[in-house]
Amino acid sequence: MIGSLKGKVILKTEKFLILETAGVGYKISVSPDTMSKVSTLLRSEKNDIIVSFWIHTHVREDMLDLYGFLERQELEFFEMLINVSGIGPKGALAILGITSIETLRKAISTGDTSYLTKISGIGKKTAEKIVIELRDKISEEKNDVSLKEELDALEALKSLGYSQNEAREALKKVPVNADTNTKIREALKILGSHAKGR
């Protein structure tokens, strides 16, 4: 099994990239968040930058897929998610791309299924399965993250005309322990800078 890969990114698409290592190109599926971080790295450095990924090798009868993560904790969380019945690798990647791992841990450890369904768009039954199967594996975070404040900020940004995806992407870049007003203010700065950059 492949556990990690280091090489040069020679192709990027919305859902996967090709990483060339020792003359071999590996197709690696990544989350939107990881793709964004890789794009930023490639823009800020020379094109021949070497990128390292932690890899999950997913084997099926007719296929072998690679899923890549820049951080080991992302890989570990991904592997916990795919062990929940009904969640496959693509679903787990989508969940990881929605918000920070700290916020997801808090939602699961407190049994907040409404947060999981509102933020990730997964169904209620799947959210309940995630909580039931992972709650004991996830220790309660000492740094209290208010899920209600995150939801309030998301709703406020949507009421200002931003899409759910735009609002979520901006909120992911705001410190998780910020209060609602700070979250909204910082997210608006991020959204404003994106609009100027277009």
Image (cartoon, rainbow, N blue to C red):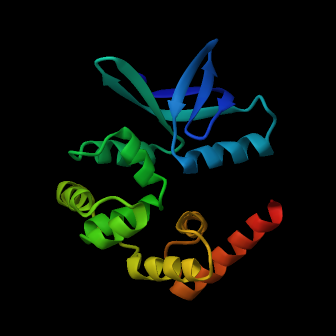
Please name whichever residue, 128 or 68, is drawn nearer the observer in this view of the structure: 128
Residue at 56 percent of width and 82 percent of height:
159
The tally of labels here is 0
| Position of residue 138 measured from the top left corner of the image (x, y, whole percent) | 27, 59
Q: Image quadrant for the N terminus?
A: top left
With 155 as the anchor, is 198 left or right in this view? right
Residue at 81 percent of width and 61 percent of height:
197
In the rendered image, is residue 141 in sight?
Answer: no
Give above or below for 70 relative to 105.
above
| Position of residue 100 measured from the top left corner of the image (x, y, whole percent) | 47, 61
Residue at 60 percent of width and 41 percent of height:
14
Q: Image quadrant for the C terminus?
A: bottom right
| Position of residue 33 measured from the top left corner of the image (x, y, whole percent) | 56, 51
| Position of residue 126 measured from the top left corner of the image (x, y, whole percent) | 25, 56
Give above or below for 173 relative to 28.
below
With 45 as the anchor, is 190 left or right in this view? left
In the rendered image, is residue 52 in sight?
Answer: yes
Dividing the picture into quarters, in which one does residue 89 lie?
A: top left
> Residue furthest toward the bottom?
181
Give above or below for 71 relative to 187.
above
Residue at 47 percent of width and 59 percent of height:
98
